[in-house]
Image (spheres, coloured by chain):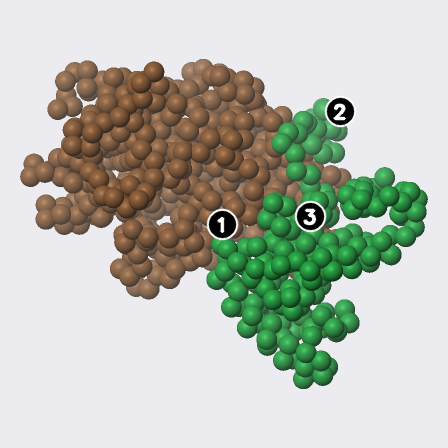
Amino acid sequence: MSDLELSRRAFLSSTGTAARASMIVLSMPMILSASRQARAAQAEGAAFSAFTAEEAAEFGAIAARIIPSDETPGATEAGAIHFMDHVLSGTHSDRLPILREGLASLQATVRSTYGTPRFSALSHAQQDALLTEIEDGKFFGTIRFLTVAGTFALPAYGGNRDGIGWKMIGFEDRHMWMPPYGFYDADYAAKGA
Amino acid sequence: MAWASYPTREEVDFVVIGSGSAGGIMAKELSSAGFSVVVLEQGPHLHAGNFKHDEWDYTQNEALVWGPRKGHPQTFRRYEHEKAQIVDRPPLGYAHNVGGSSVHYSGNFWRLRPIDFMEASVLGPISGTNFADWPISYDELEPYYTKVDWEIGLSGLAGPWDPPRSRDYPCPPMPVKASGVLLERAARKLGLTAYPEPHAILSQPHNGRPGCVHCGFCNGFGCEVSAKSSTAVAMIPLAEATGRCELRTGCTVSRINTDARGRATEVVYWQEDGTEQAQRAKAVVLSANGAESARLLLLSESSRHPDGLSNGSGMVGRNLMFNGGSRVAGLFPEPINAHKSVATTRVIHDFYSIDPKHGFYGGGGIDERSLSRGLPMTAALGGSVFGGKSWGSAYKKSLAREFTHACSFNGHTTSLPLSTNNVTLDPDVKDKWGRPALRTTFMNHPDDIATMKFFFDRSMELMEAAGAIQIEGHFSEEGQRGGVHLLGTCRMGNDPATSVVDRYNRSHEVPNLYMVDGGSLVTSGRGQPTMTIMALAFRAADHIIQAGKRGELA
């Protein structure tokens, strides 16, 4: 079994789905989609401190393009938006104006290009095209920083739910490891220098 | 057991400013010898149970390394004619807590070698620099290196690769990592020797502390089992147990006062709540590190010492050296998992001194590391090392591959001492106490950069020999913009006109003031200076204790 499959299975078991394993693998995209909707609903209902509900939806949509949900879960399932809300209402509140100004500017572009005010209402392709335009700017840099941090920081900060970010890259948070740690040191132990 | 507690208006024998690599040793040695000691530490006293695998707090929220978010901005400029600017990440990086940076270091402990102490004589002067011999030899320092091995607690393997040693390491080396195997096998192919990295981390129980559990949150983090040999676990408890050493945390020193005779009399500081205090003392040991000690001396100016205390030579704050570096990353077909265990397990010292026929001065070592210190969030923030987009599905895939299947071969190299590279008081920016911020002025000597390039090239050859399927490298071609090895700013020497402290770390100018930290280093060594900082501290303490026994301290 590959690492990827392991992380999928771990993710699925942590969502509490009671379906059989074979069923899960076959219906993976559907379950992921349902899970995303559940998370989104939860996000709508949850009380945000720094964000309005609209801001949370818009920033969440951007985060979902930075670390998308594809073969593995992404920023949405990790709850990166909750991490962002947490640190922006505390230690990193100085970044909030950058995000608000950036979002207003992005929404102005969305309105003039597509005639709708919501970035989150656009297709993924439309979203990606817009984000590519601004990927070198301060606004995108800030939201990318917070999205990535929210996907990989300790779950205690509100994101990286169930260690989703860590599983994505093959990191396991343990307090003890024993050698061998990888392939080459195992090989060295078996064959010598 | 009674804990020491001294009234501030009564003279103690010593105030030690700073409880880090040098200060922790000075506190333990002086108190064990019977002296009364007050240690002033600006940070908190953290213990194993306080440390977490909390990458956000440690790398982004200034948990140990304070910066602008904690009210300690620093400024940087390249050249002295420029105006320095505030930098988000403090250019001079050090931990603020009992044990100082020995709490968060990676514990790579290289002794200097005999050549380091007499290189200027052997190679001749280098124009435009303050390159000089040390006033002491390797042989004079060797017993104290051995003291560090055993009292601080080191793991390593003695061999022909080591400088001369009088005693074996107390603990065997750390188990080799996959990345270390790649370096060792590549070295052998190229006719070089990669040997086990010496660590100030215990591989097995020693002095009542346990062996390393290889958790991987090492470099930049505090050890959760106290296997890392910081002075916070190896020295401070012994100092406190004497009943003669009082550790005062949350105390930020503002100045050292002197009397009409030019002797240090008291150390003025703020408690955490802002209350100003002054501790009287017979003598002062300044071990606040190569940045803070210089700042404090400059802040302690007076009519008698208009350019700062102990600064008749004008050398306080000058000759700042960081050690250069280069990094070559390689992607491999099989898992490496370099994020587990200690930072590095193999090192090559075949290029300790680059042949002068290359036309520049330098030397160094090469070791192997994880990318991004093996930290998941730091790796993800950095994005793909081997190119590609920094967001989207392709980005996710590259992270998944690189985190487990890549490592780097890093060069650690010499820095030349220059008057124009220095720590001074920023004229405009202040810290939360109203003290002038640390201002760094730094541009590498061309030989530093040529040396980094030399090591970059050797690492490239090694990475190819190791069989990497993709290779990317980097060194500071345009000069470094900061560092964590803070060296040279209170340099040691026999001549008071060109140095700040004498061969025993005593101020040339103030007879009861000792500067003991990275500032004392005359040359930079090849990287990993803490072993030498600690050996100098044991030696300075030994000298003070012997002088005290002969009644020479008064």
What amino acid type should be assigned to the residue bearing mark 2?
Lys
Q: Which mark is residue A191?
A: 2
Query: Which dot, 3 or 1, sits closer to the camera?
Result: 3
Q: Locate residue B348, reporting x and y percent.
A: 55, 34
Q: Locate residue B371, reporting x and y percent.
A: 61, 45
Q: Is residue B148 visible?
A: no
Q: Is residue B279 left or right of residue A94?
A: left
Q: CA distance from mark 3 to mark 1?
A: 20 Å
User: Pointers 3 and 1 in contact (CB under 8 A)?
Assistant: no
Q: Is residue A137 above or below residue A152?
A: below
- Give the residue at mark 3: A161
Q: Locate residue B535, reporting x and y percent.
A: 36, 26
The quarter of the image holding the C terminus of chain A is top right
Q: Is residue B90 visible?
A: yes
Residue at screen point 45% across, 15% down: B167
What amino acid type should be assigned to the residue bearing mark 3?
Arg
Q: Is residue B541 above or below residue B404?
A: above
